Image: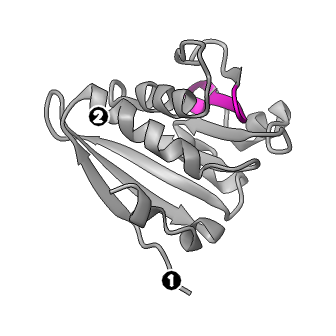
Amino acid sequence: MNICAPFSITVESPEATFALGRRLAPLLTDGDVVLLNGRLGAGKTLFVGGVAEGLGITDPVTSPTFVIVKQYVGFLRLTHVDAYRLGGTAELADLDLMDNPGVLIVEWGEAVESSIGSDHLNIRIDHLSETSRAIVFEPKGTWQTRQIDRVLP
């Protein structure tokens, strides 16, 4: 069995960040959890917008910062959470999102990683320049056997 190690993809524009999210979408299945991290303005919501488009969602994706949770329906349901304002893992548990159908993407996911379990995909978006980003994929648990490194580069 091949194990997918962490890997990084450099994108040179916001459009490329969006496109990479769109390329990830077909690899997602019901029940998947993605934790998305990066500093303010890194492109987290833009990346989620690409995922949403790849899932057939036509509604515009906006940051869930003030509402905490947004849901969209396409080929799969997408639940988009902003954990920045959550008081930790207990508040995430109170939202009862882990058993919802579809895909769960959590921005600022490092704040709640300990409550997610071992099967998830960590994605970190690092600033390289005004427009360039390094997008680091770190598969955990069953994600390590999904070979996303062969599909995304």
User: Mark 1: few, some, or many residues within 10 Å (few <14, many ≥20)?
Assistant: few
Tell whether 132 sits left or right of 100.
left
Tell whether 103 sits left or right of 145.
right
Taking the image as drawn, is residue 31 in sight?
A: yes
Q: Nearer the viewer, residue 88 or 71?
A: 71
Identify the amino acid type marked 2. Answer: Ala
Is 131 one of the magenta-colored residues? Answer: no
Residue 58, placed above or below residue 47: above
Residue 103, placed above or below residue 45: below
The percent coordinates of residue 35 (x first, y second) are 56, 46
Which residue is most to the left?
Answer: 129
Is 84 one of the magenta-colored residues? Answer: yes
Residue at the image point whose x is 59% and y is 16% from the top: 58
Identify the amino acid type marked 1. Answer: Asn
The percent coordinates of residue 114 (x first, y second) are 66, 55
Taking the image as drawn, is residue 39 in sight?
A: no
Q: Which mark is residue 67?
A: none
Say which label, 2 or 1, has the lower sequence index: 1
Q: Which mark is residue 16?
A: 2
Real-space Cα separation, disc 2 to disc 1, in angstroms: 28 Å
Residue at the image point whose x is 23% and y is 48% from the top: 10
Residue range (magenta)? 74-85
What secondary structure is marked by label 1? loop
Tell whether 46 sits left or right of 31.
left
Residue 8, placed above or below residue 150: above
Which quadrant of the view contains residue 85? top right
Which quadrant of the view contains residue 97? top right
User: Mark 2: few, some, or many residues within 10 Å (few <14, many ≥20)?
Assistant: some
Residue at the image point whose x is 43% and y is 32% from the top: 47
Determine which residue is flagged by label 1.
Answer: 2
Which quadrant of the view contains residue 102? top right
The percent coordinates of residue 141 (x first, y second) are 63, 70
